[in-house]
Image (spheres, rainbow, N blue to C red):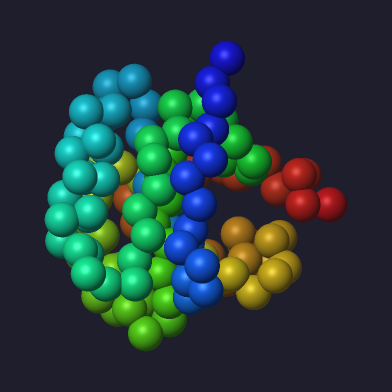
């Protein structure tokens, strides 16, 4: 059974947006490379790149990793993901405190849109 690493966001991290980058068995290597490239690219900035999560969590229909960032870096992170995501699906959403709204009405997709299990938010 997979156990999520207890890697935490730094104290007082300005987590205002999430990007979920989805992968599958065939794209795990590319996702790992993308994650490494993101760590290097955003080094020294208020961008947190989470670990590869190889199992389904929450409403997410595929394994994924997250990039968390403040509003002030929205354009930089999203433009980088537009250029780099290749065939991976990416969900970007605000963190307003309303998970249902954040993952639906306030969400944007790059690549193929995936069907989330929003029943988890009800």
Q: Is residue 92 visible?
A: no
Looking at the image, which is closer to me, 23 or 42? 42
Q: Which quarter of the figure is the N terminus placed in? A: top right
Answer left or right for 108 relative to 115: left
Is residue 39 depicted above or below 96 in this figure? above
Q: Residue at x 34, y 20 (%)?
A: 25
- Residue 75 % position (x, y): 29, 78
Q: Residue at x 60, y 59 (%)?
A: 103
Q: Residue at x 36, y 77 (%)?
A: 74
Looking at the image, which is closer to me, 55 or 43? 43
Q: Is residue 27 visible?
A: yes
> What is the residue that sits farthest to the bottom in this orientation?
72
Image quadrant in which you'd find residue 58: top right
Is residue 18 depicted above or below 35 in this figure? below
- Residue 61 % position (x, y): 55, 35
> What is the residue that sits farthest to the right in this orientation?
122
- Residue 111 % position (x, y): 33, 50
């Amino acid at each position: 059974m997979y156990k999520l690493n207890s890697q935490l966001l730094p104290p007082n991290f300005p987590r205002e947006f999430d990007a979920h980058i989805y992968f599958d068995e065939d794209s795990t290597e590319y996702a790992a490379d993308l994650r490494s490239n993101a760590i290097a690219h955003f080094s020294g900035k208020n961008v947190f790149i989470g670990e590869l999560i190889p199992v389904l969590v929450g409403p997410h229909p595929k394994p994924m990793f997250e990039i968390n960032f403040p509003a002030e870096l929205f354009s930089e992170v999203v433009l980088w993901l537009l250029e780099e995501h290749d065939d991976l699906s990416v969900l970007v959403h605000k963190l307003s405190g309303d998970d249902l709204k954040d993952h639906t009405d306030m969400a944007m997709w790059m690549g193929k849109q995936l069907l989330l299990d929003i029943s988890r938010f009800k």
